[in-house]
Image (spheres, helix red, strand yellow):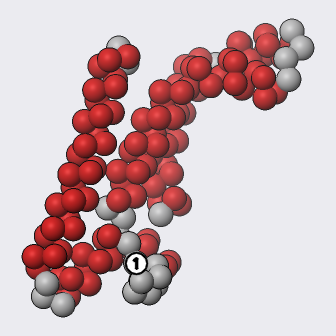
Amino acid sequence: TLFVTFPLMVREVMPVLQEIGTQQEEAASTLGAYSWTTFWKVTWPSIRWAVIYGVVLTIARALGEFGAVLVVSGNIINRTQTATTLIYQDVENFNVTSANGAALVLAAFSIGLMLMMEWAKKRRGVH
């Protein structure tokens, strides 16, 4: 799932990294800062919100991931079953009520994450 959804994280962070450039990191290095200090004091504050948004998008997408999970994990009941494969199994077994309930929970959680992300964007003044 991480392999399939990680590009969402990259899509959020890459433009921010390109925009801030390397000048501040190079200045910190020139002044003698270690690489981890440079990351935590210079880079991280600039990309923090992009990483948070990327994580939220990745989680929301991962909740609905079906194909990669089914193929890679093999859908072993009670071992590698995820909510999406549970929904698939319920539909196959004509347990539509259970499938709809699980799908509704996943949809509500994903929408909730997206609304929280938009609220945080507005609160922080990020566009």
**Where in the figure is residue 16, as x and y percent of width and height?**
52, 25
Does residue 22 appear left or right of residue 115 in this picture? right
Q: Is residue 61 left or right of residue 89?
A: right
Disc 1 residue type (three-letter): Gln
| Residue in the picture at 20% in, 65% down | 103
Q: Is residue 102 above or below residue 112?
A: below
Name the spot of residue 9 as percent of width and height, x first. Answer: 49, 43
Is 46 positioned to the left or the right of 125 in the image?
right
Residue 109 drawn above or below residue 89: above
Disc 1 residue crowd, few under 14, some 14–19, many 20+, Cα 10 Å: some
Q: List the single residue furthest toward the front.
A: 78
SS label for mark 1: loop
Specify the quadrant of the image occupied by residue 25.
top right
Residue 8: x and y in percent read 44, 46
Image quadrant where residue 93 sits: bottom left
Name the residue furthest left. 97
Left/right of residue 108 with respect to residue 29 in the rendered view: left
- Residue placed most toward the observer, 24 or 45: 45
Residue sitting at the far right: 32
Q: Nearer the viewer, residue 101 or 8?
A: 101
- Residue 127: tell me if it is visible: no
- Picture residue at 18% right of the left edge, 82% below the top: 91
Query: In which quadrant will I find the C terminus?
Result: top left
Dividing the picture into quadrants, the one containing residue 117 is top left
**Compared with residue 106, is residue 70 higher up or lower down, i.e. above or below?**
below
* Residue shown at the point (34%, 23%) measured from the top left: 121
Which residue is denoted by mark 1 in the rendering?
81
x then y, percent, for residue 116: 30, 34
**Residue at the (44%, 87%) spot, across then down:** 76
- Is residue 115 visible from the viewing direction of this image? yes
